[in-house]
Image (cartoon, grey):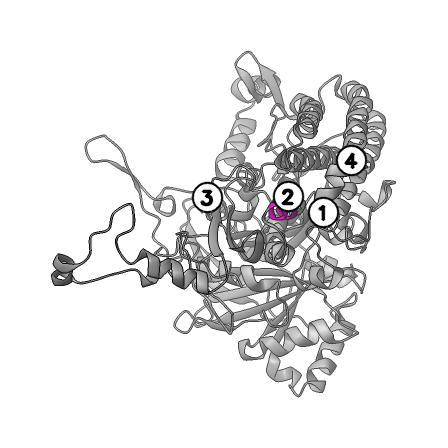
Amino acid sequence: MSASDLAETPATPEAAGGARTVDLGMPIVIGERHGMFGATAGQDTTGYGGLVVPVVLPGASERPYGSWFDTCVDDLARALQERGTAYDDAVERIVVDRDELTVVVAREHLPVVAQALRDDAALRFELCLGVSGVHYLGDTDNELHAVYHFLSITHDSRRIRVEVTCPDADPHIPSIVATYPATTWHERETFDMFGIIFDGHPALTRILMPDDWPGHPQRKDYPLGGIPVEYKGATVPPADERRAFN
Amino acid sequence: MTADLGPDMTIEGAEHSATGGAEEFLDSPVFTVSGAGDWDDLVDEATSLHEERIVVNMGPQHPSTHGVLRLILELDGETVTETRAGIGYLHTGIEKNMEYRTWVQGVTFCTRMDYLTPMFQETAYCLAIEKLLGITDAIPERASVIRVLMMELTRISSHLVCIGTGGMEMGATTVMTVGFRERERIFQIIEMITGLRMNNAFIRPGGVAQDLPPGAIDKIRELVPEIRKGIREIELLVNENPIVKGRMVGIGHLDLAGCMALGITGPVLRSASLPHDLRKATPYCGYETYDFDVITRDSADAYGRLRIRLDEMYQSLRIVLQCADRLEASAGEPVMVGDKKVAWPAQLAIGSDGMGNSLDHIRTIMGESMEDLIHHFKLVTEGFRVPAGQVYVGVESAKGELGCHLVSDGGTRPYRAHFRDPSFNNLQATSIMCEGGQVADVIVAVASIDPVMGGVDR
């Protein structure tokens, strides 16, 4: 862990939300948090200040990234070049946060990036640990994210994260099953839960939910439904409509 | 390779049976038990194909498929020609539920995923939260030692169930009774320390819920030799047993290339002779300071995995004893992070009405300090806020790499919690392990993967 990484890692939860003072390149605002609680900046801690806190995700990092990340990104650029893909086309940004390397890849170039990560001797990420979907409602035109984690046993158990986004209106991401057969079920699960369609998957069907289930349950806009109780038509409201400290 | 088939058992050629319209029905032949209809044609057709192809659903309620795993087997006589695994029967939406609970409450959910390895989910989840908070280095040494102790005890109990139920599925009941007897001893320790046998919710963000109760170390020292004796008993029972070897040697073969392609980790990967263990590769909770060996074998079959699990239990016992030494030396040190904005305000204690917050703490907040009461109330109801971002933490569970991908949007609840369960991933190897073998070998091959459907389906 380099000194710059340490500086980026908030030491206490007080550094959360709007009071975050560290420079993270161009942070990505994905929404606003409204509510009465969680004031971290200013003097008003009463909870009645009508807080509006921007939800900010770490943005692109500047070189040097620190640790082994710089050489790894260089190797990735070279490996992509060898495969006829320009690094700048394929990689949208590099995010180094909390001592983890994230490569945000343009979705059409995901298969070649996966191929490079597996086959290039200097990269050699043998294991793909699966796909995790995330639905950012506020990230307009990039609502759905597919997050891949790779592990290189050859190179000292390094881990790298590849993040791919697609808009809700066109939820297509190329499948990497041809390169990493291990992602077969993981892509099915992400399809099942988020509705991301992995083009080229050999059999993209639901895996956890029943085959005829409508909707994709882990999306943030999936209706949760309340619980009717036997008291004068009362209903326990769904979890996202209950009073909560948000 | 993995698409779902229809749920019905079908016999090749069955679709050729008469399906006439309503008007045809009046003139159609009457079918009787003696087969007055066109059954002869059907039988002739099936016979002329010279094959006895049949699709069988094994599960989801089959006693030897580890819970509600559904295997769709296509059989040619006794030979399995195609295997597909149908999962999802135990899907409980734990990941979705965690998005509507505070960070601390999430522990209670994720401990219920793989119900044989609760401590690993708890640890992975808490390590991920701590990484998001940036307090990884602030976790007290004693808390990490207790985490390691609990994880290794859980590893032994998980392996005991795997070997025990695996033996039972082959008809060896004694392996099961011995395995569960020894697991009960592990539970005695775990129950003494956490108050519960399983679903503990003991490991919390920032440390552990409670320090060891008096006498816990003595209990460990008393029971470890007995557990070792029990494991030895299983070893004597199975290691050179001709029936066990006949059933397991060469069964469920998956070589290193297959493991790599399918992302297999844990004992299955180590049975293909690759010494990959996250406890050594990317140490967490101070694993680099313990003496233990990574067990590998080169047979790449079910028997090799059985032996690996047996040997791993001895290694875990080694670590447990090292933990006991360290815990004796560090008695009285804190088990929760010092930051009062994160740390749970009270330690647990046994009261007259069961386990709850310690009475001293209740006395303070109810009778003496209004500020402590407010602090307690805010932290318990609202929880703490975690800076926005995402992390991934992997721990070596009893079954392989258990990964936790956490996303925070800066709130008091996870924006997204995803668990990469080793059983979920490893179960993909069912097809390649079973196809071409016998029906009876399917049981052995699946048991050697050690899937737990609670973890697979989440």
Question: Comparing marks 2 and 4, which lies closer to the viewer?
Answer: 4
Asked if the residue under mark 4 is in contact with the one under mark 2, i.e. CB atoms within 8 Å, the reply is: no
Residue at which label 2 appears: B447
Mark 1, mark 3: which one is toward the viewer? Answer: 1
Residue matched to label 1: B302
Q: Earlier in the sequence, mark 1 or mark 4?
A: 4
CB-based contact (under 8 Å), mark 1 and mark 4: no
Above or below, comparing residue B9 to residue B204 in the picture: below
Badge 2 marks a residue whose secondary structure is helix
Compare marks 2 and 4 and give the one earlier in the sequence: 4
Q: Nearer the viewer, mark 1 or mark 4?
A: 4
Identify the magenta region.
B440-447
Q: CA distance from mark 1 to mark 3?
A: 30 Å
Q: CA distance from mark 2 to mark 4?
A: 18 Å
Amino acid type of the residue that numbered disc 4 sits on in the rendered structure = Asn
Mark whose residue sits in front, 3 or 2: 2
Q: Residues within 10 Å of mark 2 (few under 14, many from 20)?
A: many
What residue is shown with label 4?
B241
The answer to whether marks 1 and 3 sit on the same chain is yes
Q: Could you tell me which chain the residue with mark 1 belongs to?
A: B
